[in-house]
Amino acid sequence: MTGALAGKRIVNTRAVHQAEALNTLLRRHDVIPLNYPCIAITPPDDPALLDATLVDLVAGHYAWLVLTSANTVFAIAERLAVLGLTLNGGRFQTAAIGPATAHAIQQNLGISIADLPAEYIAESLANHLPLKIGERVLLPESALARPTLANQFSERGAQVTVVTAYQTVCGTGGANIPHLLTQGQVDMLTFTSSSTVTYFLERLQNEGGQLETALTLPAACIGPKTATTAQAYGFSLVDVPSEHSLEGLVAILETYFESTER
């Protein structure tokens, strides 16, 4: 094996249905991925409001559909299938944060993206989207989503409808990370959302893991909000890639270990 990442044991905290995308990138660098699903995605307890907004969207009552994650896309695709609806030919434009979300939209909803900000963060989309005053925006999100994006759209004069598309709960299964931490067999943690940070610590504590040991490990965070959450919980070694994507995340891992080997 060659390269700074070769043989490193890196924890992947993504949900089961998303973990393999990151694992594939890690294995290309001869990393040993340690799956530890810290989140799981479930439908809202009552999908009636989501269903109603999707019906309105198809009927042309919204100017924009804004999607902030692949999980939101999957949740919407499931509800559309139940309702027997399609978004093809809709009289609305679609915006997304990040190429992974854009790819999920094209693959699962069969519609094209009208707007993709240069930076893969909510603030960039909020400032970049060509909104007109009074336009109606549909913003389906996680039940845990912060109101930042909706507030910024509203400040620009849009009429924003926020609806819960899915719930994020604590994950299960995967490697025995509490044991591996005590054995010193974890080199780094990766976090792709604030919820993966929160539920990593909750799950580790529930399983008898050593929080103090975990907090001393370097944490690679996909974006600034995730990094802010990690720092708030006490992680001291936090890295954020300039490109907020899985590829960027792997690149920052390599940079970190290259610097430690000098």
Image (cartoon, grey):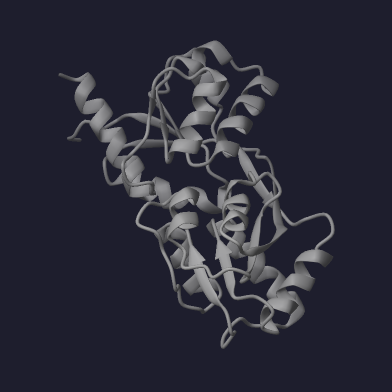
Residue 214, visible in the rendered structure = yes
- In the depicted structure, whether residue 8 falls above or below residue 141: above
Q: Furthest residue to the left?
A: 262
- Percent x, y of residue 76: 65, 67
Question: Toward which corner of the image does residue 176 lie, by quadrant?
Answer: top right
- In the depicted structure, whether residue 150 falls above or below residue 189: below
- In the depicted structure, whether residue 172 falls above or below residue 236: below
The quarter of the picture where the C terminus appears is top left
The quarter of the picture where the N terminus appears is top left
Residue 81, visible in the rendered structure = no
- What residue is rendered at 65% in x and 75% in y? 62
| Figure label count | 0
Question: Toward which corner of the image does residue 185 lie, by quadrant?
Answer: top left
Q: Furthest residue to the bottom?
A: 89
- What residue is rendered at 43% in x and 68% in y? 115
- What residue is rendered at 21% in x and 30% in y? 4
Left or right: residue 39 versus residue 2 is: right
Q: Nearer the viewer, residue 72 or 206?
A: 72
- Percent x, y of residue 54: 71, 74
- Percent x, y of residue 228: 50, 30
Q: Nearer the viewer, residue 178 or 232?
A: 232
Q: Nearer the viewer, residue 238 or 176?
A: 238
- What residue is rendered at 41% in x and 47% in y? 22
Left or right: residue 136 versus residue 177 is: right
- Percent x, y of residue 254: 25, 34
